[in-house]
Image: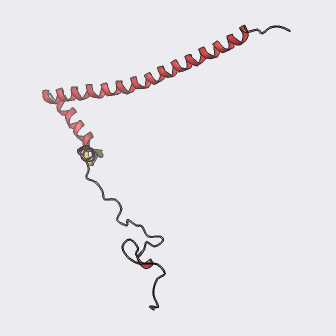
Amino acid sequence: MKPNKPDYEVGYGKPPKSARFTKGKSGNPKGRPKGKPNLEAAILRALGAKVVINENGRRRTVTKLEAAMMQLANKAAGGDLRAFSLAATLTRLAEDRIQQEVSTKTCLQDADKQVLQGLMQRIEATTKGDSNESGPEQ
């Protein structure tokens, strides 16, 4: 008889106790692999990168998107028609987006008002029903 014979069978799907997961150690030490960034994430990361600009003799840190919009506005103000057209289009898009956000907020408020009016009508109906109902007097 062997002296180190375990009291269980070792084989496929039954590793020895020394090779099993130990307490405090992860079963997946490397973790889930990072995925590839999609196009939207790559564009937002690139436009969100910070750059240092000189404005009126002062150094300022802004995002690349802000720097590009400043250059576009400067070109449009300088008489570049293509830059002016693009700036006007971007302004219209921004204003439309702001209007949509405001309209969704007001729609929620209108819906809330309708719910409250419905509740008030129910309360009034039940209170009128209680006062109108008079049982037989004894």
- Relative image position of residue 135 (x, y in whole percent): 78, 9
Is residue 45 depicted above or below 131 in this figure?
Answer: below
Count of number-bearing discs: 0
- Relative image position of residue 109 (x, y in whole percent): 48, 22
The quadrant of the picture occupied by the N terminus is bottom left
Seen from the viewer's position, the closer of residues 50 and 137 is 137
- Relative image position of residue 29 (x, y in whole percent): 37, 67
Question: What residue is shown at x 38% (from left), y 27% (from top)?
Answer: 101
Q: Residue 65 occupies which quadrant of the picture?
A: top left
Question: What residue is shown at x 46% (from left), y 83% (from top)?
Answer: 6
Question: What residue is shown at x 73% (from left), y 9% (from top)?
Answer: 133
Q: How is the image coloured?
A: secondary structure
Q: From the viewer's perspective, tell me whether residue 16 is left or right of residue 36.
A: right
Question: What residue is shown at x 20% (from left), y 34% (from top)?
Answer: 72
Q: Which residue appears farthest toward the right when viewing the image? A: 138
Seen from the viewer's position, the closer of residues 77 and 94 is 94
Q: From the viewer's perspective, tell me whether residue 75 is left or right of residue 2.
A: left
Q: Residue 64 occupies which quadrant of the picture?
A: top left
The reply to whether residue 78 is visible in this rendering is yes
The reply to whether residue 80 is visible in this rendering is no
Q: Which residue appears farthest toward the front when viewing the image? A: 1
Is residue 20 depicted above or below 133 in this figure?
Answer: below
- Relative image position of residue 14 (x, y in whole percent): 41, 73
Seen from the viewer's position, the closer of residues 1 and 125 is 1
The quadrant of the picture occupied by the C terminus is top right
Seen from the viewer's position, the closer of residues 121 and 1 is 1
